[in-house]
Amino acid sequence: MEWFNNFLLNVVPLAPKWAVRLVAKKYFAGETLESAAQEIQSLNQKGFYSTADILGENVEDIEEVQQPVESYLELMEKISDENLNSGISLKLTQLGLKIDKEQAWKNFEKLLEKAEEQNIFVRIDMEDSSCTDDTLEFYQKARKKYPDTGAVLQSYLYRSENDLLEMVENGTTNLRICKGIYTEPPEISYQERELISDNFFKLVRLGLENDVYIGIATHDLDLIERCENFIEDNDIEPENYEFQALLGVPIEKTLKRLRDNGHKVRYYVPFGGEWYAYSMRRLQENPDLAGYIFKDFFKLKSS
């Protein structure tokens, strides 16, 4: 089926935008704050946690960054007012990182102040490798102002193990480990799935062994089982980790089983007007999603 999914991956972007939206809508929580809040509330009622993300990145005009800043301020108000069990995730290029680093920090600092006021956890998403150094710099700087901040490491980058160990020395307490979604050259990244998965597990293990709270962010069922076995074999307490998944990815049975077995499970809940670009990135990250979308399309046609 891999060849078929890769074929679909090349075909889906040629489809009309309305058709992509029809089948991709399960992978994002609508375009409005209200729709996102409803999705988060539904997840909370089922015993799941969430992190809310306003879609968008690589803002090209520094004036445009004020909109996502205001949107994140409104999001945190909504989380607090409705007592939603959710943190937030954000990308620094959405705040102007690639345009004006100093201004990007001021924008980020404004959000940190609001997060501290509302007692909301902030996760800095990791972007492509051109942003890695700046992102980790912002993270270390942010922790001094607001300790309830987390970062992300990508297991397909060679550097991630050294980054993790350095972060441990600097007192890092919360990391999400993911495989990585951006296309990176072989000079700096693993290209084979098996090597990426092995490094993912290694990063999870290193983090847990060094008292770092780890978000295990993968839809790879074999890798989830591998991490779960390590947790059980080493008596890792539930307050030291969580499993994370993207909204809509069809591994609900596994996530419910994890939840029912006492593991904390968090959904990544994206929303907003930039849903199309997000959907295309998700396909590039995981060609299997093209197969899921193909099945969803024929379910819609037959219903």
Image (tube, rainbow, N blue to C red):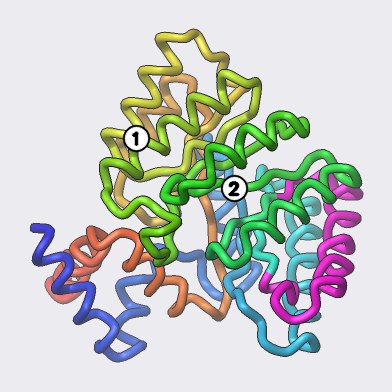
Q: Quadrant of residue 180?
A: bottom left
Q: Which mark is residue 152?
A: 2
Q: Helix, strand or loop at disc 1?
A: helix
Q: Height in image: 134 above or below 196?
A: below
Query: Is 107 within the magenta?
Result: yes
Q: Judge whether residue 45 can be spotted in this image.
A: no
One can see residue 201 in this view: yes
| Viewer-closest of 283 and 204 | 204
Q: Earlier in the sequence, mark 1 or mark 2?
A: 2
User: As displayed, is residue 182 above or below residue 122?
Assistant: below
Q: Which residue is mark 1?
A: 198
Q: Compare residues 43 and 245 and report the one nearer the observer.
A: 245
Q: Which range of residues does the magenta coloring cover? A: 93-122
Q: Tell me residue 224's x, y (percent).
A: 35, 32
Which amino acid is tagged 2? Answer: Val
C-alpha span from label 1 to label 2: 17 Å
